[in-house]
Image (cartoon, grey):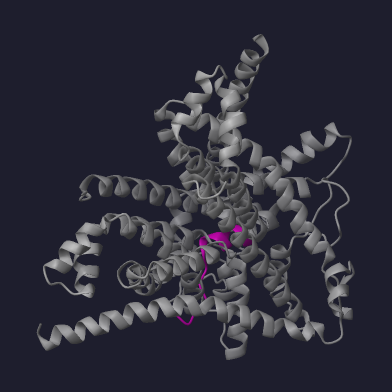
Amino acid sequence: MKTKEAEERVMLWIMRFAALSIVLVLGLIILSILIRGLPSLSWDMISQIPKGGFYYGKEGGILNAIIGSLYLSAGATLLAMIIGIPAALYINVYAARHDRMAAAARFFLDLLWGVPSIVYGAFAFSMMILLGMRTSLLAGIVTVALFILPIMIRAIDEVLRSVSPGLSEASYALGATRTQTAFRVLVKQTMPGIITAILLSFGRAIGDAAAVLFTTGYTDHIPTSPDQPAATLPLAIFFQLSSPIPEVRDRAFAAAVVLTLIILIISLLARWLSHKYEKRRIKF
Amino acid sequence: MRPFSKIRDKAAWLWMLGSMVLVLIVPVLIAYGLIAKSTPLFQDNLIVDILMGSDWKPVRGSFGFLPFIAGSVYVTLMALLIATPLCLLTAIYLTHYARKRTLRLMHPIIDILAGIPSVVYGVWGILVIVPLVSDTIAPMFGVSTSGYTLLSGALVLAVMIIPFILNIMIEVMRSIPEELTESSMALGATRWQSVKKVIMRKAAPGLASAVVFGLSRAFGETIAVLMVIGNVPKVPASVFDPAYPLPSLIANNYGEMLSIPRYDAALMFAALILFVIVLLFNLASRFFITRYEMKQKGTLK
């Protein structure tokens, strides 16, 4: 009798410790990034491009990487939206009548969900050699868009799926076509959810290093057209961290703070939006 | 209906269909491209020599992948070994012991962990894990090392896959009816005994799916691992040795791959291995989750 209660108590403490350790690790990650990076984060750091080369120059900041990353992720997210939203609608409006087809499409997308970004990067790079293209913002945008597409489609799909079928049926009964139902009823009804999915994809795009490593290149300058190479925050961290010069390493740590803050803001925004969505959803 | 809106309707339909087709074609293209690009490697190397050979000297045309495959397998398995028990215990705690509010508070934490970019995990690894391994853990075992080791890679990787495994485990545990715990406890079992003997048995395929999913995430992880694992192309003999996983191999060598014959074929082959292995693990994960859902519905005894 006594042993099973003792086991219960011991296990409870072990479990509490496990849960607590996960919370502590997150705190430790954010804290260590902030402690090391915040002192080097100044207005000059985020408002100037590196001077004298990003790897050796002591002066200047990371504006090239901040702008480059924003261009890249915004471009990739837009491109992914143009393909991703209609594809997700297709699964839920046209394929929905054939259960098997929708299930097959979801299954296929789930398989792709985990394909590492380095595979996309390597593939895109070999295509670029084949076509004689140089590293450029545009190549990066296309590669990252392909990489975030399965993630975005499945996220939007989950939101669309949560709409009760009664709503589409009501729309059809009023004489709306399937396209009208898709865009005017489904999209309108799930707008905050779709925006959440897009925000999360943007977060994936801005944080990814392996897909842009081969395709976007790196430069000290801010790109003025899509066929120029562009610097990105993850690579600004990765490259400058290995520099022997402490001032350059400081730039890497400052870039890590900027990237972490962007991700935190996106995460909080997405959470807030999905709460809003839950509230205004029409339930049957 | 007016003819104009009919055209618009048709156009929108084509747009949706076209997007869907495009999404389905891209991975087929990737697979085809990787296979086509890596075939030159097999022209005068046997596949056995490539997969099992440990001699990596691209300049002399010798491509033994064993150090990289071993590096990937070791670091992935070690990360799982660390992450799985932590996730399992936490999932049980959050779904069966903690208050509902604790679970609600935990969700944003898991989301943020999942959203932190790989390269930030790498920075954290360099700031915290590498010194921890070289100054504290290795001396405890009487080893001296730079800290850029298999163990550091595994620790960073473990933290990175925790949110993914934990998320699925919580979902699985939550989908098991409360009545099962209640009836077990009514028979005199403690809560832990009910979890151990009843719930875990019921949840097993779902939990397996979570672990396999974590495995597939871990296998392809690139930048964070690359930053802390040392990157020495030798099969590691201990956890305090550096290792060199497949994704690091691709990421580190893309610049020079053009100048050496067949080097690009070798790197494309590495990408192909990653692609195939991740697809296989994802397939296995889906298989387990389907089994679990069938078990829930009672169609599988």
Location of the N terminus of chain B (image quadrant): bottom left
Question: Is A238 covered by the magenta stretch?
Answer: yes
In depth, the one of A132 and B11 nearer the eye is B11
Residue A42, relative to residue A54: is it above or below?
A: above
Left or right: residue A184 compared with residue B31: left
- Dividing the picture into quadrants, the one containing residue B202 is top right
Residue B217 placement (x, y as % from top left): 61, 56
Number of numbered markers: 0
In depth, the one of B213 and A24 nearer the eye is B213
**Residue A53 visible in the displayed image:** no
Tell me what residue is drawn at x 82 percent, y 87 percent: B43
**In the image, which residues are magenta?**
A226-239
**Residue B12 visible in the displayed image:** yes
Q: Pick out the residue farthest to the top.
A: A2
Left or right: residue A155 compared with residue B34: left
In depth, the one of A144 and B284 nearer the eye is B284
- Dividing the picture into quadrants, the one containing residue B141 is top right
Question: Is B249 covered by the magenta stretch?
Answer: no
Tell me what residue is drawn at x 63 percent, y 83 percent: B33
Residue A20 placement (x, y as % from top left): 55, 29
Residue B176 placement (x, y as % from top left): 48, 38
Residue B299, relative to residue A177: is it above or below?
A: above
Tell me what residue is drawn at x 62 percent, y 36 percent: B86
Residue B135 placement (x, y as % from top left): 78, 36
- Dividing the picture into quadrants, the one containing residue B13 is bottom left
Tell me what residue is drawn at x 22 percent, y 63 percent: A168
In depth, the one of A277 and A78 nearer the eye is A277
